[in-house]
Amino acid sequence: MLLSERSRLPQALALHIDELAEISRQLRRDLELAFYGAEDLTPSDFYAETDAERALTSATRVVDLVARHVEAVS
């Protein structure tokens, strides 16, 4: 969805859309595995602290890029 809506985003943000889309894919995949696991995967055995740190870094990157383009709602 991000890629298809690139033209609707502010240009400064659109420049980072490929990075944002990749982060979105990674976080979504990991969220599903972490919550539900898989037939051959137990989340607590699969994920390590470094995975959590990477996810936090990625999410922080998204917030840093997007926050300046979101109007405050009061």
Image (spheres, grey):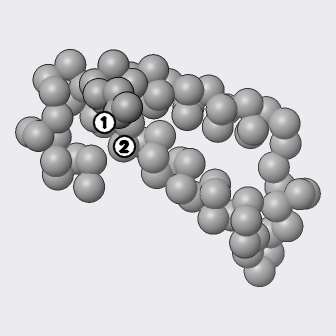
Report the front residue among 54 and 60.
60
Viewer can see residue 73: yes
Q: In the rendered structure, which amino acid carries the disc numbered 1?
A: Asp
Q: In the rendered structure, which amino acid carries the disc numbered 2?
A: Ala
Q: Are marks 1 and 2 in contact (CB under 8 Å)?
A: yes
Q: What residue do we see at 29% from left, 27% from top?
A: 71
Relative to 31, say whether 17 is above or below.
Answer: above
Q: What residue do we see at 74% from left, 39% from top?
A: 51
Rendered-image quadrant of the N terminus? bottom left
Rendered-image quadrant of the C terminus? top left
Left or right of residue 34: residue 49: right
Q: Identify the secondary structure beneath mark 2.
A: helix
Q: How many marks?
A: 2
The residue at the far right in this view is 45
Left or right of residue 31: residue 59: left
Report the front residue among 69 and 60.
69
Report the front residue among 11 and 72.
72
Q: What residue do we see at 47% from left, 28% from top?
A: 63
Q: Which residue is mark 2?
A: 21
Viewer can see residue 66: no
Q: Quadrant of residue 42?
A: bottom right
Disc 1 from disc 2: Cα separation: 5 Å
Left or right of residue 4: residue 1: right
Q: Which residue is mark 1?
A: 18
Q: What residue do we see at 17% from left, 51% from top?
A: 4
Q: Position of residue 23 (x, y in %)?
A: 47, 40
Q: Position of residue 43 (x, y in %)?
A: 82, 61
Left or right of residue 74: residue 2: left
